[in-house]
């Protein structure tokens, strides 16, 4: 599948300071792509180069083959900056009308498109309401409507939920899922790991200006290939016997055991055949394997592990 957004060796230096360097990534159409990284990692620098607000020091970036910053690339891009403010005396419809004029849309096309995007973000009933009366969540949804007005393929959202309460965040999440269902590609720059975990198909992790990991979220989270086994018929001595007989082969550990005769075991680096062997051993010992599933590390622990690994390398 051809990439919608593609960067090659994208680098920005601010004099002697690095913004980001040698970032090569691809965002495929119809996905929600999350850009992650600690403060100062270079995320905003990267985003500003994509939307054409900053000129790269070197490297290339394209949206559907058009150089980022060009008129053709910007036609295909909708952008919601992190800290935006609309004149609060305008109504939602007036904000969209103003944006449409800036985008050079014909008045007839504009009116029907404004209705469409207001419906999409759930603000139809508020079209005539002044922005000053909008909650932060509604303002954010209006911002997304604005970014969608010219029907771009790629929507780039900078921290769209960080200032919102849980209900506002939930609404934005649902809206982003709807955008994906409509075939839009969403590029999300966010600190909210729970949003990334709930929404993103692919992620990129930036640290100290460099891309340290990128790929499908599932692959990154399941990267450890560990399994968790729930076992019945367990007795305390079984732990010693299991570790003695299997510990070296499967790097087996007892995570917890309880008096009712159940236990949770963890094993690392195991394939399906080995899992079958392990099951055979358990059955041979009079135990039952109730459940076996891939251990999911969770994005927060993945993120912290990445940071720790970076810290060790840097020492
Ligand atoms: N205009 C600028 N002049 C000089 N250095 C800058 C400028 N903008 C950013 N930087 C530096 O570039 C590096 C990356 O900053 P950037 O704002 O892109 O990171 P970030 O990941 O977006 O951080 P945050 O999550 O805190 O917004 C930082 O070291 C920052 O100090």
Image: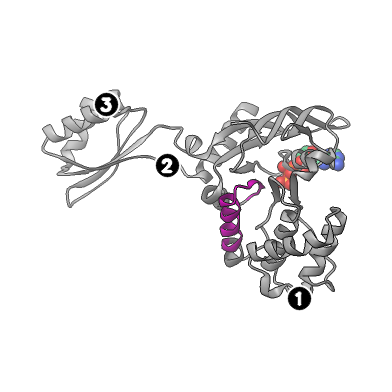
**Label 1 – label 2 distance at C-alpha:** 47 Å
Q: Position of residue 95 (x, y in %)?
A: 81, 65
Are the residues flagged by discs 3 and 1 in contact, CB closer than 8 Å?
no
Q: Any mark on residue 296, and which? A: 2
Are the residues flagged by discs 1 and 2 in contact, CB closer than 8 Å?
no
Give me the residue at 17% from left, 34% from top: 282
User: Which residue, given by chain and number where applicable, does mark 3 sit on?
Assistant: 274
The image shows residue 125, relative to residue 273, as above or below, that is: below
- Which quarter holds ligand 1? top right
Are the residues flagged by discs 2 and 3 in contact, CB closer than 8 Å?
no
181 is within the stretch colored magenta? yes
Relative horizontal placement of residue 22, taking residue 248 as reference (left or right): right
Q: Badge 3 local density, few (<14 within 10 Å), some, or many (20+)? A: few
Give me the residue at 56% from left, 39% from top: 202
**Which mark is first along the chain, 2 or 1?**
1
**Which mark is first along the chain, 3 or 2?**
3
Which quarter of the rendered picture does the N terminus lie within? top right
Q: Which residues are magenta?
A: 170-191
Give me the residue at 64% from left, 47% from top: 186
Number of the front mark, 3 or 1: 1
**Label 3 – label 1 distance at C-alpha:** 64 Å
**Label 2 – label 3 distance at C-alpha:** 19 Å
Extreme residue toward the top, this view: 249
Q: Badge 2 local density, few (<14 within 10 Å), some, or many (20+)? A: some
Q: Any mark on residue 128, and which? A: 1
């Amino acid at each position: 599948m051809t990439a919608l957004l593609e960067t090659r060796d994208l680098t920005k230096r601010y004099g002697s300071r690095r913004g980001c360097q040698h970032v090569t990534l691809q965002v495929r159409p119809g996905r929600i792509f999350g850009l992650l990284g600690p403060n100062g990692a270079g995320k905003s620098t990267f985003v500003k180069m994509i939307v054409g607000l900053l000129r790269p020091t070197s490297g290339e970036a394209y949206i559907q083959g058009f150089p980022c910053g060009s008129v053709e690339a910007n036609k295909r891009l909708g952008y919601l900056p992190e800290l935006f403010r609309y004149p609060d005396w305008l109504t939602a419809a007036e904000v969209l009308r103003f944006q449409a004029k800036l985008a050079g849309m014909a008045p007839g096309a504009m009116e029907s498109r404004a209705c469409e995007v207001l419906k999409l973000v759930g603000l139809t009933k508020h079209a005539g309401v002044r922005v000053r009366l909008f909650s932060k969540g509604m303002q954010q949804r209006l911002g997304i409507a604005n970014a969608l007005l010219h029907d771009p393929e790629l929507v780039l959202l900078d921290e769209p939920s960080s200032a919102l309460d849980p209900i506002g965040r939930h609404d934005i999440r649902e809206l982003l899922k709807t955008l994906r269902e409509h075939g839009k590609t969403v590029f999300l720059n966010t600190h909210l790991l729970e949003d990334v975990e709930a929404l993103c198909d692919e992620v990129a992790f930036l640290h100290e200006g460099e891309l340290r990991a990128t790929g499908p979220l599932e692959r990154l989270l399941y990267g450890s290939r560990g399994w968790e086994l729930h076992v019945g018929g367990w007795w305390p001595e079984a732990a010693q016997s299991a570790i003695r007989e299997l510990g070296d082969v499967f790097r087996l550990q007892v995570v917890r055991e309880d008096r009712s005769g159940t236990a949770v075991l963890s094993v690392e680096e195991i394939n399906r055949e080995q899992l079958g062997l392990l099951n055979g051993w358990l059955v041979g010992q009079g135990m039952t394997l109730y459940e076996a599933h891939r251990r999911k590390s969770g994005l927060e622990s993945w993120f912290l592990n990445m940071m720790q690994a970076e810290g060790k390398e840097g020492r």
